[in-house]
């Protein structure tokens, strides 16, 4: 009917790693499926500000609205970057740079997406992690880091992700969690459910399938584990784990929307599509851990990664 516009789709992706050979062509082919489509990018676009700008400018030109939150890779300070900024200064530079492209960042008002199922408020979150998801038997960060030293596996963040001006990544995380919690409380509305977007999962359960369980220390914080129950949340979108799937926790769908590295997606394919179309209908109410889409669930063959670009052998040893 003339003059009646069909609502666009909400699409999501993360861990594009656009500078990696094998991913560049994949990323350059990301396009909307219909007019009015929004795209959520849940972090790890690339490691240099130049590549982040190039990739996000391309996507902002194609989609009606693009929403971004940073991953750990955008926050790395690499000698090859040339930008030289560390910590919060680097993050704020990226926010300003992407804001000039019209991309919605965690520092902007949370926009409302008008879906066929009603309005949904899209909330990009920047929260980091605080080493509270400890390995079994550990009761402190020091004990957890001892496990990492023993295995030789830790995140490159220990050398490349600087918390300046905060004294530690934990302190930066604490400040971000407190700030974000206040913002969510101000906009929480049962008539406009939230779509929470974060690079890291807000609950620990999705990390239980990692091949190296101690790597969960770099994957989130206990302080967000009740948010999907406390606030009116339609769904949660995240990446970082490189284990694309859909699980349900307390009736709320959680979508891991990463592309990951070629050696990962060439092994398991793209069981949910390269761009994930997010179902914004009512929460399913299915038991925790169920993957109603028929994709690979917690016991599936892809329950391994974070083996390529998050962690590396010997990085950040205590």
Image (spheres, helix red, strand yellow):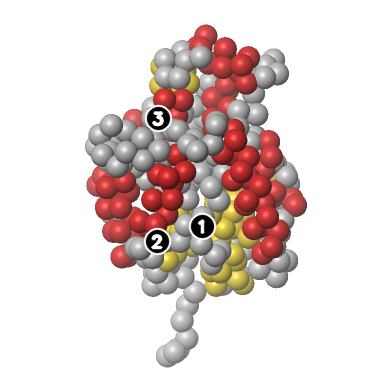
User: Marks 1/2: CA distance?
Assistant: 9 Å
Q: Name the residue tied to disc 3.
A: 160
Instruction: Pick the residue in front: 247 or 140.
Output: 140
Residue 24, position as x, y percentages in the image? 26, 44
Q: Could you tell whether 148 is left or right of 57 in the image?
A: right
Q: Quadrant of residue 58?
A: bottom left
Residue 145, position as x, y percentages in the image? 56, 17
Whether residue 11 is visible:
no
Residue 277, position as x, y percentages in the image? 48, 57
Looking at marks 2 and 3 on the same chain, the residue that comes earlier in the sequence is marked by: 2
Q: Residue at x 67, y 19 (%)?
A: 140
In contact (CB < 8 Å): disc 1 and disc 2: yes
Looking at marks 1 and 3 on the same chain, the residue that comes earlier in the sequence is marked by: 1
Q: Secondary structure at mark 1?
A: loop
Q: Residue at x 57, y 58 (%)?
A: 123
Could you classify mark 3 by the number of other residues whose Cα lies within 10 Å: few (under 14), some (14-19), or many (20 or more)? Answer: some
Whether residue 214 is visible:
yes
Instruction: Pick the residue in front: 154 or 235.
Output: 154
Q: Could you tell whether 21 is left or right of 3 in the image?
A: left
Q: Name the residue tied to disc 2.
A: 99
Q: Residue at x 35, y 63 (%)?
A: 100
Q: Name the residue tied to disc 1.
A: 107
In contact (CB < 8 Å): disc 1 and disc 3: no
Looking at the image, residue 118 lies above or below residue 216: below
Looking at the image, residue 20 lies above or below residue 276: above
Could you classify mark 2 by the number of other residues whose Cα lies within 10 Å: few (under 14), some (14-19), or many (20 or more)? Answer: some
Q: Residue at x 61, y 16 (%)?
A: 142
Looking at marks 1 and 2 on the same chain, the residue that comes earlier in the sequence is marked by: 2
Q: Secondary structure at mark 3?
A: helix
Residue 147, position as x, y percentages in the image? 57, 13
């Amino acid at each position: 009917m003339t003059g009646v516009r069909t609502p666009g789709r909400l699409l999501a992706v993360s861990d594009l790693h656009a500078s990696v050979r094998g991913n560049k062509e994949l990323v350059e082919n990301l396009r909307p499926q219909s007019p009015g489509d929004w795209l959520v990018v849940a972090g790890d676009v690339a490691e240099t500000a130049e590549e982040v700008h190039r990739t996000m400018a391309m996507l902002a030109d194609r989609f009606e609205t693009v929403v971004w939150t940073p991953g750990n890779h955008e926050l790395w300070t690499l000698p090859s970057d040339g930008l030289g900024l560390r910590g919060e200064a680097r993050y704020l530079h990226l926010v300003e740079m992407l804001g000039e492209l019209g991309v919605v960042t965690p520092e902007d008002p949370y926009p409302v997406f008008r879906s066929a199922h009603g309005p949904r408020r899209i909330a990009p979150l920047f929260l980091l992690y605080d080493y509270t998801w400890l390995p079994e038997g550990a009761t402190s960060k020091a004990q957890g880091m001892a496990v990492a030293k023993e295995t030789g596996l830790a995140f490159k963040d220990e050398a490349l992700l600087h918390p300046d001006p905060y004294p530690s990544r934990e302190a930066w995380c604490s400040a971000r969690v407190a700030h974000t919690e206040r913002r969510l409380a101000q906009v929480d509305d049962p008539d406009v459910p939230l779509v929470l977007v974060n690079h890291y999962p807000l609950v620990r359960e999705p990390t239980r399938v990692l091949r190296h369980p101690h790597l969960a220390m770099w994957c989130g914080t206990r302080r967000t584990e009740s948010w999907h129950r406390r606030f009116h949340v339609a769904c949660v979108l995240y990446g970082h784990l490189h284990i694309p799937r859909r699980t349900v926790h307390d009736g709320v769908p959680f979508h891991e929307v990463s592309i990951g590295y070629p050696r990962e997606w060439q092994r398991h394919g793209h069981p949910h599509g390269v761009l994930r179309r997010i179902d914004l209908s009512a929460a399913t109410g299915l038991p925790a851990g169920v993957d109603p889409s028929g994709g690979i669930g917690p016991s599936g063959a892809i329950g391994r990664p974070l083996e390529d670009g998050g962690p590396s052998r010997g990085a950040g040893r205590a």
